[in-house]
Image (cartoon, rainbow, N blue to C red):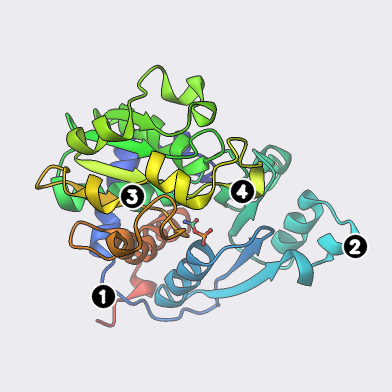
Amino acid sequence: MKHLRTLNDLTINELEDILNMAKQMEGNFFQQHYPPVTVANLFLEPSTRTKCSFQVAQNELGLHAITLDESSSSVQKGETLYDTVRTLEAIGCKAVIIRSSQKAYYKELENITIPVINAGDGAGDHPTQSLLDLLTIQQEFVIFQGLDIVISGDIRHSRVARTNADILRKLGANVFFTGPEEWMDPAITKGNVITIDEAVEKAHVMMMLRIQTERHQNEEGLSNEEYHMKYGLTLEREKRMLPEAIIMHPAPVNRDVEIADELVECSRSRIFKQMKNGVLARKAVLASLLNLKGEKQYAHII
Ligand code: CP
C-alpha cells in the first residue's frame, strides 16, 4: 500500500494485517530514530479525535510531527492544496495526513510521492475511522460474517456511513440503515432501510451518527427533542436491544439528539473504546506506510 485515501487502497489481506498490527500496538512505544522521521498533519477542517489520536500515535511511534491548520498555513493566502503538500514533501516530511471538507481532495495529489493518509474528505471517506470501528467490532464479536449492523441517522452526508457500509458488506456483515427518509442515500443504503424500532431489536451493533449540520440544513426542521423521539436511541429503545448488542458512535456526540445522554457511557457503549482504538489503528497505518514494522531501528522499549 502506497497511500490510504479510501479503504479501496487496501486488499482484504492488507486490511486484516493492519487490524492485527493495531492489536499489537497497545503498550508498544518506539524509540525516536536518527535521522529523525517527520510527518505532517494538515487539518483544513475541525477535528478533535482524528487529529489528536494521530498526534498520540506519532509520539508513541517515535516520529516527529508538524501540525498545520487552515488558519496557520498559507492556504489562507490562497495556496493550493497541491502546492501545500508539495512543500511539505520538499522540506522532508515522509508522510502527510490530511483532513479537508473537499470530497476526494486526494485526486489533486497524484504526483505526490510521499504517503497521503486521508483523515476525512468532506462527505467522501474516513478510512482510519472505519479501521478503528472494525477493530472495535472485531474485539467484541471476533468475526463480521452474519452480524446485523445498523447505521443510524444522517447517512447521506456521512463519510463514516459510506466507508463503513462498503467495508462491512465486503466482510460479510448485514448492513441496515435507519433515519429520516431524506437522509437515506440509495447509493449507500441499497434498499436496506428499516425503522429505528425494528433496528434496536435486530442489531448486534447500533452505530449512531451525528447530524452533519455543517454539510446541510436540517431539512426536516425537527427540534432536537423531536428528532430524538422520532429517530434517536432513547432510553426506552435501548431496553429492547439484544443482550449482546453494543452501541457505537464516531463522535462528536450530540447528547439527547441521536442518543440519550445516559447511554453515551452505559455498559453497552463502546464510544470511548473506539477513541482508544483510534490510536492503535493509526499507529498501525503509520507503521505500515512508513515501513516501520519489524525494523530494528524501531526497537520496542516496553
Ligand atoms: N470521529 C471523528 O472523526 O472525530 P473528529 O472530527 O473529532 O476527528
In primary-sequence order, the first of circles 1 and 4 is 1
- Amino acid at pointer 1: Gly
Q: Residue 243 at x, y = what percent?
A: 9, 47
In primary-sequence order, the first of circles 3 and 2 is 2
Query: Is 11 located above or below residue 96 in the figure?
Result: above
Q: Which residue is mark 1?
A: 27
Judging depth in this view, the residue of 187 and 238 nearest the camera is 238
* Mark 1 C-beta to ligand 1 under 8 Å: no
Can residue 132 be seen? yes
Q: Residue 227 at x, y = what percent?
A: 46, 44
Judging depth in this view, the residue of 183 and 91 nearest the camera is 183
Residue mark closest to the camera, 4 vs 2: 4
Query: Label 2's element?
Result: helix
Q: Residue 281 at x, y = what percent?
A: 36, 57
**Marks 3/4: CA–CA distance:** 23 Å
Query: Label 4's element?
Result: helix
In primary-sequence order, the first of circles 3 and 4 is 3
Residue mark closest to the camera, 1 vs 4: 4
> Is the C-beta separation of discs 1 and 4 under 8 Å?
no
- Amino acid at pointer 4: Thr
